[in-house]
Image (spheres, grey):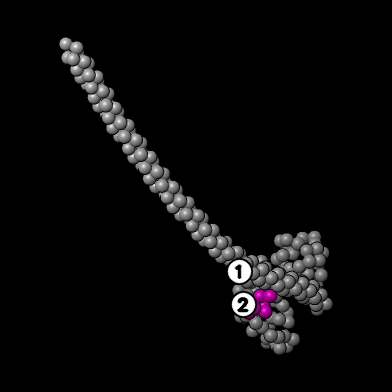
Amino acid sequence: MMAQSAIRTCEICNQATGIDYCQECQQLFCDNCKLMHLRMKLSRNHTFKDVDHPEVKLALCEEHEWPYILFCETCNSLICKKCVIKNHKSHKFEDITVEKISKQQKIVSEQLERFSKGIKEEQCKVSVVKGNMQNHGNHYEKIREAISCRGKTIKSYVDEIVDSLSRKILETEHKQQQEGNAYIDAIQKVNKTIDELKLKQRKITKRKKWRCAIEIIAKISKGQ
C-alpha cells in the first residue's frame, strides 16, 4: 500500500510538487515543468497522466511514490532512486527493460495462475465440505428424530409396565387386606364360640354340682 504521507517532488526542478507522470520519460513533473516539457520538440507528443491514476500508481514505488527506475536482482523487485539509497546499497541492479518487464509479467501470470488454480481447488473442497456437512446434518437430524421417537416408545412401554405393576401391587395389597380381615373375623368368631362353650361348660358343671348336692340331701332326708 502506498505511503499516505509521501511527498511527490517534481523530478525536473526538485522544488514543486510532482502532480503529473510522463509515461515516456517515466518521471514526475510539476505543472510548470510539464508545460516546458511539452514545448520541447523531442517531447511535445509525450503523454501525461495524473499521479493518482491507477496505471500511474502501478508505476510508482509503494513506499516512496517515486517512479520505478531499476530492477534489483538481489531482491527480485522494482525500485525507485530513493530505494537505491535507503534499502538496496551494493545490490545488483538492472535497467527496467521490456524484456525484464515481460519476464516479470510472465512470473506474475504464472503465480496468479497457480493461485487461481489453488483457489478453485480450495473452493471445490469447501463446496464438498459444505455438502458433506449438510448431508451429515441431515443424517444426524434423522438419527436424533429416530432416537427421540424410540425414546418416546420405550417411555410409553415403561409407563405401561409401571402402571400394570402398580395396579397389581394395589390389587394384591387389597386382596391381602381382605384375607387378613377375613382371618381376623374368623378367629374372633372362633374365640366367641370358645367363650360360649366355656360358659355352657361352667353352667353344666354348676348344674351337675347342684344335682349331686340335691341327691345327697335327698338321701340324707330318706335316711332320717
Question: Which residue does the image show at 41% across and 47% down from the upper left?
Answer: 175
Above or below residue 184? Residue 29 is below
Above or below residue 61? Residue 33 is below
Whole-Å distance between the Cαs marked 1 and 2?
53 Å
Can residue 67 be spotted in the picture? Answer: no
Quarter of the view holding residue 213: top left
Residue 68: numbered disc: none
Question: Which residue does the image show at 72% across and 65% down from the upper left?
Answer: 83
Above or below residue 81? Residue 45 is below
List x then y, in percent, for residue 165: 48, 51
**Residue type, mark 2 in image:** Asp
Instruction: State the residue position of label 2.
Output: 52
Instruction: State the residue position of label 1.
Output: 138
List x then y, in percent, for residue 195: 29, 31
Whether residue 19 sits left or right of residue 175 in the image: it is right
Q: Which element is circle 2 on?
A: loop
Disc 1 crowd rating (10 Å Cα; few below 14, some 14-19, many 20+) is few
Whether residue 185 sits left or right of residue 98 in the image: it is left
